[in-house]
Amino acid sequence: MPTQTTRKVLNLFLASPGDVGLERAIAQEVVTNLNKILGRPFGLYIELHLWEDIAPGYGDPQDRINPDVDECNLFIGLVWERWGQRTKCHSSGFEEEFERAVARRKATGEPEIWLVFKAPRLEKLDEPGPQLEQVLKFRELQISLRQVHFADLKNADEWRSELQTWLLKHAIAVSGTDIARANEPQATSSPLALASPPENSSSALTESKVSTRSRVPKQLIELSNSFGEVLRRGELGMSRNDESFLTEFDIARLYLLAATWIARRYTTDFMGIHAANLLYKYRHAIEATDAESDELFRSFLQDRSGIVPGWFWVRDDFPEGPAEALFRIATTDASGWLRVRALKLMAAARVKLPTRLWSSLPISDEDPEVSSAALAYIGLMGDETALPMLDVDATDGDQRRAAAAAKEAKLRILIRLRPKEAFSELLASHGYFSSELEEAFGEKVKELPTEDLVKGAENPSEQIRKVSVRELARRGDLSLELADSLEKDPSVDVRQLALQEMVYKRGMPELARLQAAAPKTVLLSNLLGGKQEIDFESLRLNYYRTLPTDKLLATITWSSVDGAPAYKVLAIDRYEDISSCIQSDLQNGFERIRQAWISDLQTKLGAESAAEYAKDFEEKKLDEFIRSQFTVAALSGLVAHALPSDVVIARKHLQSENRDTRLAATQIISKFGNAEDVQTLLNISTDAWGELKDFGPATAIRLSSDPDGLAFEILGPGNTVGRDAALRWLMNRDSDAVRQYFLELLTDESDRNRARGTYYLSRKLNRSEIEELLLEYPTRSTYYYDVVTWLDRHLYSPPPLKQLFDRELEQEADL
């Protein structure tokens, strides 16, 4: 079949939240395999676009992703249990991408839109939470709209199978080519010739003149005999379990050689996920050539999904660290993505390159993603000698992007070395200030002069204003005039700081004015735990902390909104001034304060009117509400200054209907409680939410006479409350039972639970035990690639990459 001289590109955008990393990796593998089938014979190439491929840079992240959505020919939306993070206009990035695709389809007839729902886990459906609830609502909406026919898939294997079928059929439809002809037999030379390439061959085995393993390994020569026997017998259609002539190891070994040649001579692609894991299974038996070792290194280094192991292959190659190996990949590899990956790993692990190599980094690479990653590395690790490299002129679009990345890199260096100069440049940059630069300033902002911070408070950039106003407030240099000018600032954080200063200077009348001016819908939303706006409770408490004790005592009245907050400030910050009252107030329900209020009413209104007024309060249950506010305030003081005797009072409030009261009582019991409190703590946690839902079981476990036993009981089937607390407890224990539990987690269906099991074992087992586990684990009937990859990274990756990977595993475990 003649090779196509023209190429048609099918742009595919895969929209998905962050919990389907395995499925995104499978999509890359499927597309790579299809491109090998479709590319050269038929001139059709599928270009897969993913949100994580977008290079870092200035601007809203979603705005950087949307152009790929607007240019795709095929849009695939894939969701599981997460909905994603809110964007400027939509409830998630996925929703924004889907709506853009649908709108363009209605207007232009393109793109083709596929929608796929991966089945949620059953335990998640019992208590879906806000993320999964959004997914389920979206699915119901699609059923009612009937505009996109969607598919439901069970797992990743089904996704792989169906995606390959769908894409192949779609490719046939759009190309107008009879792809079935690809199955016609083609003339080919005998593969036996590959065992001994001629002298003028350009194969990978003869290219390396200085290879320490340039000779053909004996196992390959022996394998050629077995392969030749297969060819002579015509046994090419062997079944899955047929090992008459070629074992699983033999086939894996042949694949390694063929994949190396294909990648080096034709595609620059990487080994497939399953093939890489199969090869790893035989890692102790394979005698790899230098070229094969390089290809194995490329394949696991490029892995973004955490399911391709391979540091074992190069475990002895970096006695002085991986800097120069990563540098070689970053500057010479044919794959742009791999070069970006190497640079990002260097930055994330703080790999220090020799200064002499900085000038050779690809900061002006024609691939903008590569140059951006190189500039980000220089900005993170560079010093004065790197600054001249970062003066980049900008003319066209790509150069402007490079100039912006160079400017940020230069600023990051200046922040470390000369923060005042860096801030002056930021003030002159018309609002340019990324979140990375904000983080880089950190404590350096304390070195800036006040006059520059005042200018920063008036800057168009929200981040610059926030950094400046926060530091001015910390110093006490935020003037009332400047605070007034920021009263309606678009940033909630800036407004909060400005309003706090206004309340400090003008007192409670100012707080009353500000609160009265706030939209009632915002106040209600805050009360219900919804969208956060100005935190008026924080403004009130912070102001009270500035008042002398006598004024605070005078503020404590029964009917005033200021009474309980003033009591709380005294109880927490000036405990000695009110400690003699707290115990008795809690015992008698704050009747002392209530009777003082009634006495005041009698003086002002007379006995009869005062009685009517007090009765009205009681009938409307206002007394009950006020008493609960004072109870929380008093218990907050005891939490900060608790004595062993306070546990008696805490137990009386442990089953209060008020959540904040239960939480404060639990915090006191956590200090001085005992085993008799365990069951009550578990009972009140059953229907709890927020901090109490986890803190209650954690306290119960710690106070239990058999904490490990209780933790295992909580983790038993049917229990849904306190599981994270139980896992955190066991994570710090070491016994045969605990080890066995975490060993069993290695085959759990949950990615997070497998990470937890791996994290525990990586901390508790010694090196030889982990190596033994890594040998045994892939022999199980069910095993997972991510576990193998984490263990491989922990055992064989060089420092400082090992420290980076261990931190990532800890984050994945989420404990």
Image (tube, rainbow, N blue to C red):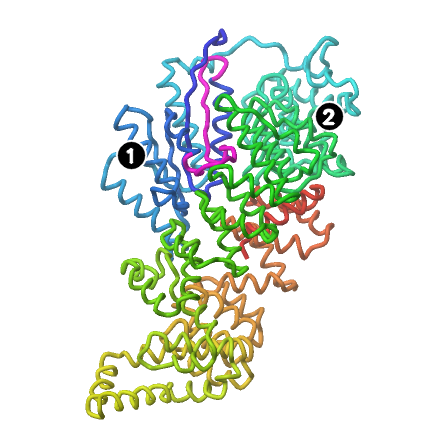
Q: Which residues are magenta?
A: 39-63
- In the structure shown, which secondary structural element does the residue marked by tag 1 occupy? loop
Residue plotted at (77% across, 21% down): 214
Q: Number of callouts in the render?
A: 2
Question: In the rendering, at what x and y percent does residue 358 appear?
Answer: 69, 31
Q: Position of residue 273 (x, y in %)?
A: 56, 34
Q: Is residue 195 above or below residue 118?
A: above
**Residue in front for this viewpoint, 107 or 220:** 107
| Figure check: 151 above or below 560 | above
The x, y position of residue 532, in whole percent, is: 38, 57
Question: Of marks 1 and 2, which one's residue comes earlier in the chain?
Answer: 1
Residue 507 visible from this viewpoint:
yes
Residue at numbered disc 1: 149
The answer to whether residue 368 is magenta is no
Q: Which residue is mark 2?
A: 290
Residue 668 makes an appearance in the image: no
- For this rendering, which residue is in front, 703 or 490? 490
In the image: residue 120, left or right of residue 254: left
Q: In the picture, which quadrant includes the C terminus?
A: bottom right
